[in-house]
Amino acid sequence: MSDVIKTDICVIGAGSGGLSVAAGAVQMGADVVLIEKGKMGGDCLNTGCIPSKALLAAGHAAHNARTASRFGISTGPVDVDFAKAMDHVHSVIAGIAPHDSVARFEDLGCTVIQGEAKFTSPRELVADGKTIQAKRFVIATGSRAAIPPIDGLENVSYLTNETIFENKTCPDHLIIIGGGPIGLEMAQAHRQLGAKVTIIEMMTILPKDDHDMVDVVRTEIEASGVSLYENAKTQRVELNGNQIRVVIEQNGADITIEGSHLLLATGRAPNVENLGLDDAGVAFDRRGIEVDARLRTTNRKIFAIGDVTGGLQFTHMAGYDAGIVIRNALFRLPAKVNHSAVPWVTYTSPELAQVGLNETAAREKFGDNIRVVTWDYAENDRARAEDATIGFIKVITTPKGRILGAGIVGRQAGELIGIWTLAISQKMKIGAMAGVIAPYPTLGELSKRAAGAWYTPSLFSEKTRKIVRFLLKLG
Ligand SMILES: Cc1cc2nc3c(=O)[nH]c(=O)nc-3n(C[C@H](O)[C@H](O)[C@H](O)COP(=O)(O)OP(=O)(O)OC[C@H]3O[C@@H](n4cnc5c(N)ncnc54)[C@H](O)[C@@H]3O)c2cc1C
Ligand SMILES: NC(=O)c1ccc[n+]([C@@H]2O[C@H](COP(=O)([O-])OP(=O)(O)OC[C@H]3O[C@@H](n4cnc5c(N)ncnc54)[C@H](O)[C@@H]3O)[C@@H](O)[C@H]2O)c1
């Protein structure tokens, strides 16, 4: 007979979503059991956001050193120690790990079980030889790299986000299948650290973002020497000695690419296997666990959050979901998700950030009944001072000025998108942004100037000139 633990909330998975629910619930007075079968911190800390941004930082440092001569600074040849760059990656992970650790969560008052959780009934699961009965369960088991059905893949060794950060030597030639955010971020980091890099994408890169913004990223990526094959079908993969050979078809022609390493970055598969979901009465399909707007599964006592639901797969969304579940499960409030102001950022240089509707989605929804204004980085004095004039901001509004969406491609786009996220979530009109006093000289002025451009046609119109002339005549 195994131990039986009775608790208020049982959370499965100690990644971005699960940790947020557990920390919030226990500090609000609930009894919490947290179960993790792998590393505390999940994907984001160990094999996702953090290592990818740390490796990008190393790549950008190398790039900045190589291009410093434009500021009159000479560095001599830039020498990259790839192993040390990876040491930096792992030291960043190690620095953050205590925040997500078993010790911290036990200190907060959680019971942490290190083992694999599996439901045995709609009200009960087992993990590490213990039976857990909870008033509410939260499934936050995340996702893993989806492995595409490509001929010959089983005969070659390939990398995913779970293994690429273990490399100690720089790949000679990294072939990446998939031109989404993972593919592009890894392509740029490795290229800047000295690898030859090829991306193979079956559609066009970053297909979820507006084409004109993606064009800016594409130009920079290609200019850096990354070979890019878009609208390319991967036919097969095979070994040629110690090289990996990838045969693709593009525009009706077969092309063979040979490289030292292969990275798969073709999207994510939800972690739904071996969880006993059928025994729990929780419906799911290949995209993930089915949830309603309150993040309840088909078993009303069980919630699911984050990547495993197959929605918008970002750390900040897993955290947002956690807040919705806490309100529903602890306070019995019927809180629902609202995805109208979800930002996302691809951390290439230049960065590409988006919140709300992009232009494509806005045109699908409202036809031509929208207004689109843009402002170029080249018109911004701070961008000029830093020689970072590539990129632009684009804002989409209703004809009356309600902000529907904003996209920014350029330096610090991820930081600049915050103010637009607030504006959209608070249903602000463009006038609010135009009236902001932005410190000079900052990239933040881009937002104000784009908003100001919205008024240009009416502000500098003949009608305005007539009014001003009339008023001036009054003395
Ligand atoms: C390379 C890469 C870069 C990324 N960069 C960004 C970024 O810059 N910004 C951003 O917002 N997002 C980024 N993401 C996405 C982000 O990592 C995920 O959206 C986020 O981690 C999802 O959190 P989660 O809690 O749903 O799942 P996870 O963080 O994956 O946590 C799930 C946890 O559940 C555990 N688990 C699974 N099954 C069981 C079980 N049966 N029993 C017990 N435990 C179990 C797993 O071991 C894991 O620890 C990136 C992802 C990758 C792969
Ligand atoms: N900066 C960030 O916030 C960030 C960074 C990395 C990852 N993430 C998250 O992780 C998720 C997964 O990232 P991802 O880049 O793996 O997935 P993705 O789904 O965003 O992109 C995968 C790309 O691979 C392509 N593809 C799929 N199968 C292919 C094949 N057989 N051949 C060629 N191309 C193929 C798709 O067309 C797509 O463009 C993202 O959607 C995002 O939610 C976020």
Image (spheres, helix red, strand yellow):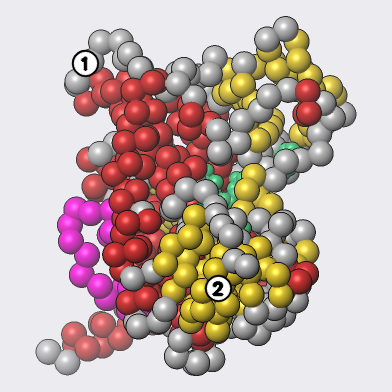
Q: Separation of disc 2 and disc 1 at Cα?
A: 67 Å
> Magenta residues, as a range?
428-447
Nearer to us in this view, 151 or 449: 151
User: How crowded is the residue under tag 2: few (<14 C-alpha within 10 Å), some, or many (20+)?
Assistant: some
Residue 119 relative to residue 185: left or right: right
Secondary structure, mark 2, is strand
Q: Who's the residue at 37% across and 76% down the image?
A: 26
Which amino acid, mark 1?
A: Ser
The answer to whether residue 203 is above or below residue 84 is below
Compare residues 435 and 173 and report the one nearer the observer. 173
Does ligand 1 reach within 8 Å of label 2's beta carbon? Answer: no
Find out whether residue 54 is within the magenta segment. Answer: no
Q: Are marks 2 and 1 in contact (CB under 8 Å)?
A: no
Residue at point 69% right, 37% down?
201
The residue beneath circle 2 is 4
Which residue in the protein does label 1 denote?
74
